[in-house]
Image (cartoon, rainbow, N blue to C red):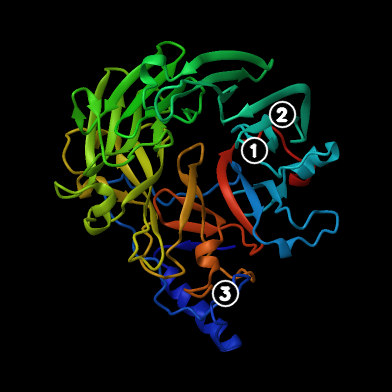
Amino acid sequence: MRTSSRSTYAWITVLTLFIFQAACGGGGNGTDDLGGGESTETDTAVPDADTGPDVTDTGPIVINPDDFKIVYTYQERFESCDNDPENDPLIRESDLHIIWPDGTHETTVTSLSLKSEGRTCEFGCFTDRNMSWIAIADSVNSTGTFDFVLGKFDHLLEAKVIKGFELEEIVDFEFGGGYFFVTKLAGQDVSGPGGRFYSLTRVELENTDVQPLLPAFPAEQDRTNSTYQGHFSADVSGEHLVLLNPTIGSQQIFHWSQQSLLEELDKICPNEFEGVCATSGSQYSDTDPVAIDPNGENVIGIFQNDDSLGIYKYDLIHHQKYFNNLLAVPAGTTYEVSACFNTTQTFSWTAVRQVQMSQDGSEVLLLVANDCPDKLKEETDIIAIPVDAIGDGTPIDAGDIRNITNNPKGERVDNIIIDRFDLSPDGNVIIFSGSPMYDVDNFSILGNTDLRTKQDRELYVMTVDGLTIDQLTNDMCYKALGPIAVTPQGTPPEWE
């Protein structure tokens, strides 16, 4: 594809549109999801990056393809896209791909060996960050749980399944360090609207040793009205876990480590009456966004209150809690009802979809979104906040927000809808899945109202200074999902 500097993007876009419109006389009517679209106005230039907090200028960041690779899922979007007579046209293919950050050497992981064993990624494939291991979902059960087998990569990145080792009825799963963590439903109390409890287990990958960590979470005394559904978050080392135990009116935050085992960091209860947390609706989930400091010093979480959305910092060293409001609504109303009417110039979004810490633990990156009814197109951005700025209990200061993507607003092709992001190992590059900007010729800009600009997702790389962005993939038949930055321990022959 192409790499665009923020400062030069405007004239490149204008020149591209002039050539394209002169040659083709404009695009289609913008209603065909298989490509085309109306001609794009020349106002689609990406605006200058938000200044935000001061950042030391060390010159432009160069994306080095030797530093990392990208693994992502490419999922078939339409049944009509499947031209392989051996495949079931009613099953949408979902395969794991690997690509270099300069857009070269794209290949499917299964083509390296798994298909020779009769394995596919139809139900999902997932790797660790070193691409030493792969978890392959064998099936999805009627209860929504997964059955897994594990495979190991060799020096050619050929994955071989470990025979005789299976994990069944898994609710949630995650690689971390040399471990694979899983949860399973362990039981349900008869009392309360939820009352389910789950077991948390880790598999030590080198010897596939199964190690029970938590036989029953939440604990019996915390199950009343619990709506916990088995989710958790692991850090990159596998040394720290965060588990959330929500009820309709409260949120408990727990931290697990080998040293401290399970400790409660906080219980958020906006409306407590006679010892009971009450609310008019459920504000909390066990998938609320949280992140763990790579240095094991802080946990960052985003939690809604009755009248605000807050960013919380839990100091694991000094056992202190800090927070700031990202967005608040007037007293007497609720966040769900009023958030869309009370966004500010400082924080113009209503939700946080994902949180990730920088590699040195100094910043927290947030995927923020605004999909209010008055928006013609969802507005998303990746912003960064210094960890040290979290803590005085006041609204977050505008000077503490650095908008990295700085997407324009409105129904524009360059208003990229971002689904998921990850950081490169050195922390200098963001990879993300987002709505495409280019037509399938990899040159023409899609029309502002082309359905691909809302429904499709492709793979991007972007420097953390926001100066360089590159769309790596472009196939209207497939959607890029769940990208992660990896440092493979092997090298296929075709990479040489």
Label 3–label 1 contact, CB within 8 A: no
Query: Looking at the rendering, in which quadrant would you find the C terminus?
Result: top right
- In the drawing, does residue 156 fall left or right of residue 479? right
Tag on residue 142?
A: 1
Location of residue 67 by image quarter: top right
Earlier along the polypeptide chain: callout 3 or callout 1? 1
At horizontal 81% and vertical 41% (from top left) the residue drawn is 115
Tag on residue 149?
A: 2
Tag on residue 444?
A: 3
The vertical placement of 360 against 11, above or below, is above
- Could you say whether the residue bearing mark 2 is in a helix, strand or loop? strand
Residue 458 on image: x %, y %: 57, 57
CA separation in Å, label 3 and label 2: 43 Å
Residue 33, visible in the rendered structure: yes
CA separation in Å, label 1 and label 2: 18 Å
Label 1–label 2 contact, CB within 8 A: no
Residue 434 on image: x %, y %: 51, 56
Label 3–label 2 contact, CB within 8 A: no
The residue furthest top is 259
At horizontal 74% and vertical 45% (from top left) the residue drawn is 495
Tell me which amino acid carries mark 3. Answer: Ser
Location of residue 259 by image quarter: top left
Q: How crowded is mark 3: few (under 14 residues within 10 Å), some or many (20 or more)?
A: many
Earlier along the polypeptide chain: callout 3 or callout 2? 2
Residue 53, visible in the rendered structure: no
